[in-house]
Image (cartoon, helix red, strand yellow):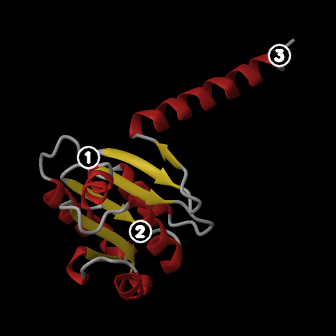
Amino acid sequence: MSQRQTSSQSSLRYPAKVVYFATGTAEEAATDFRRLGLAGNGTRLRVVAPAGLAQQLSRLAPVRPAEVLPFRPEQAPLLWVQLLRFLGFTVNARIFCLTSRQRFRLMKFLALALRGQVVFRHPGGKSVPLGFGDLLWLWIRGRWCAREERIRSYP
């Protein structure tokens, strides 16, 4: 029995450092946090949550209160520096960002501005990796398509 538990825990191994952006409700974030299995596996973790949800999330999710960082828009640059200091020169850091109906665009941009693989998570559990280069490619492609549409309208 203990061998099975050990093998299932080793399958949930993550890089040495993980940053989790809780951009949904506290219940959605706590459920997704448990689904990912981030607590108690030796991963160094920081959870970024809106200031109003930070205390509620630290009660619902299996995370230590010191690992939860409250997000306030006016303090975003300081939080970014603090997260950069936490990640350091880690090559394989992973940043999870829960997507939700609420906007939290600044938090999502902050996630993309960090060093590491960014994975957007839907509340149902589906994951979509998306990096800054992918966003740049989508922007270039959109501009190209808009240019093609303008050219089609010429005689």
Residue 131, compared with residue 72, is above or below; it is above
Give the CA separation, mark 3 to mark 2: 55 Å
Within 10 angstroms of label 3, few (less than 14), some, or many (20 or more) residues? few
Is residue 20 among the parts visible in the rendering? yes
Quarter of the image with the N terminus is bottom left
- Which secondary structure, mark 1? loop
Q: Quadrant of residue 130?
A: top left
- Which secondary structure, mark 3? loop
Give the CA separation, mark 2 to mark 1: 24 Å
Q: Quadrant of residue 56?
A: bottom left
Q: Is residue 16 left or right of residue 53?
A: left
Kind of residue sitting beneath label 2? Arg
The spot of residue 10 in percent (x, y) is 26, 51
Quarter of the image with the C terminus is top right
Q: Which residue is mark 2?
A: 34
Q: Residue at x 30, y 49 (%)?
A: 94
Within 10 angstroms of label 2, few (less than 14), some, or many (20 or more) residues? few
Kind of residue sitting beneath label 3? Tyr
Q: Nearer the viewer, mark 1 or mark 3?
A: 1
Q: Residue at x 15, y 46 (%)?
A: 90
Q: Which residue is mark 1?
A: 115
The spot of residue 124 in percent (x, y) is 59, 60
Residue 152, compared with residue 78, is above or below; it is above
- Which secondary structure, mark 2? helix
